Amino acid sequence: MKIFVKGDIDGFFGLALDNLVQVLLIESLLTTLLQFPRSFVYEKVLPGVAISLLVGNLFYSYQAIKLSKSTKREDHCALPYGINTVSLFAYIFLVMLPVKIQADAMGVKDSYLVAWRAGLIACIGSGIIEFLGAFIGEKIRKATPRAALLSTLSGIALGFISLGFFFRTFAHPIVGLVTFSIILLTYFGKVKFPFGLPGGLVAVIVGTILSYLTDIVSKEPFTPLFGFFLPLPQFSEIVKSCQSGYILPYLSVIVPMGLFNLIGSLQNIESAEAAGDSYKTTPSLAVNGIGTLVAALFGSCFPTTIYIGHPGWKSLGARAGYSILNCLFFIVVCLSGTFSTIAHFIPIDAGMAIVLWIGIVISSQAFQSTERRHAPAVVIGILPAVAGWGAMLLKSGLRAGNSSPFSDSIIEVLKKTDIWAEGAFSLEQGFIFSAMILSALTVFIIDRKFVKASFVALIGAFLSLIGLMHTFKFTPSDTILDLRLNPKYFLAYLSVAIILYFAKFLKNEEGEKS
């Protein structure tokens, strides 16, 4: 197989655009939401992003070339690889932002450094799970109901990825709706644009032009950050991260996100095999985990993943070269500071339709890839994540209204307006676990496997008892996970487990026992 073919150009534009939007989000969210200095992002974070993309893209290109030699075929396509969108939002909104808010409330100087270290430890945790899971990933996938896995991801995609950008779409409708319609035409309507231009690229170009015409771009003076930002290992910062105490409070985010990344990558490898490219599972997953660990080692807080859509890249004619071009592009723009110019002239509004589409696809997959009778379990699995996003929005509103310090009095005030903040805050904490548990439990009830459903409820009781779900405590301007033993939710899940166990003795509508 030739390393570069014509189809690699089309594949490169598609894959690079996907990753470009992720890096734009990283730059934007870190500098605005988390208030990282721009120079810090370009000197510390983006070099780690670039190196993590280099590791995976080069390996998967080599893997495709090696497979071609063994099969004597020239049509193998490298696995698409890049930054994990779901983990990006999860770690910013569920780990780094709460830590930043807490540090600000305590008057910590350079609180962004505390948030960064929390992000690094989350990324390391995800990488370890992905790497070790490469050897047992298939067993985990088979043991967990698909509805529980996909609905939990769907809830995160719907709340933390889609709804925020949906609001922004209608805040800037000329840009938002026009680019959104182009993305819908491209990916759902299968429309081909003149000269073979990728639809995502068309959307970004049109969105950028409309952003300037409608005057929604920033008017702040622009200073490019050109230079050479050498990727440096962040050993001392990682040691500080491990000593900071952020591992336990955020295990309820780190562990499930690592598992989701692992299982999602496994499913994408299976998708590639269905398209005729049979790659070995263990090394493919292991390198994915190594890419995430390399990201954290060199300063990035954002895990990498094997992307969905391999058959689409293959249908474009992409082979091994598109993956090589992708990593080389990001090495150049991230290590030279060129990305600062790209980020200035291409506003987030121009590319947000692509992110919104990603959220829609992930949410849709939860229904499309599960059995129809498990649809109620999918909906139940979505609810905790949407509730978590709503709780975050509620707290942002309270902070904007200067309703601090946070305390039980806020719960009582909101209760009078029929807003049950206590339920929202309890669902927010460890919502990834509770989503998986409630969805899996519902799947087993639908299948009348009541003993298994009872066992899942017992897992919920245990996680609630040790404080990894539902239990929360107030800080001056936030709610965080409370790791103290809490019998309230433990007793609730235990009661459910008992009821489900004895349900096996009840008859169904046909008079049969389970």
Image (cartoon, rainbow, N blue to C red):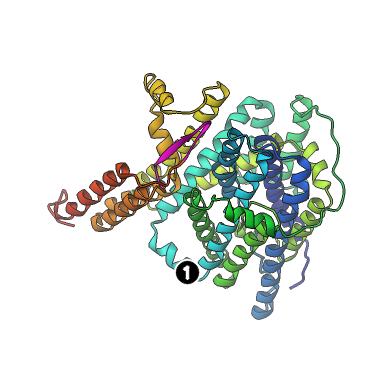
The residue closer to the viewer here, 360 or 400, is 400
Q: Is residue 451 visible?
A: yes
Taking 352 as reference, is 361 left or right?
left
How many numbered circles are shown?
1
Q: Secondary structure at mark 1?
A: loop
The vertical placement of 105 against 154, above or below, is: above
Please give the name of the residue rendered at 65% of the width and 26% of the height, measured from the top-left corner.
Answer: 173
The residue closer to the viewer here, 508 or 439, is 439
Taking 51 as reference, is 437 left or right?
left
Span shown in magenta:
469-480
Residue 478 falls within the magenta-colored stretch: yes
The residue closer to the viewer here, 35 or 6, is 35
Q: Is residue 188 visible?
A: no
Please give the name of the residue rendered at 71% of the width and 57% of the height, measured from the top-left corner.
Answer: 234
Residue 383, percent across and down?
41, 39
- Local packing at callout 1 (Cα closer than 10 Å; few below 14, some 14-19, many 20+) is few
Please give the name of the residue rendered at 48% of the width and 66% of the height, measured from the top-left corner.
Answer: 137
Residue 493, percent across and down?
29, 47
Q: Quadrant of the C terminus?
A: bottom left
Residue 11, percent across and down?
71, 57
Instruction: Tell me the residue that label 1 is attached to.
Output: 136
Taking 40 as reference, is 147 left or right?
left
The vertical placement of 60 against 452, above or below, is: below
Identify the image quadrant of residue 421: top left
Residue 214 falls within the magenta-colored stretch: no
Residue 21, percent across and down?
69, 45
Q: Quadrant of the N terminus?
A: bottom right
Identify the image quadrant of residue 313: bottom right
The vertical placement of 16 against 161, above or below, is: below
Amino acid type at circle 1 is Ile
The residue closer to the viewer here, 114 or 212, is 114
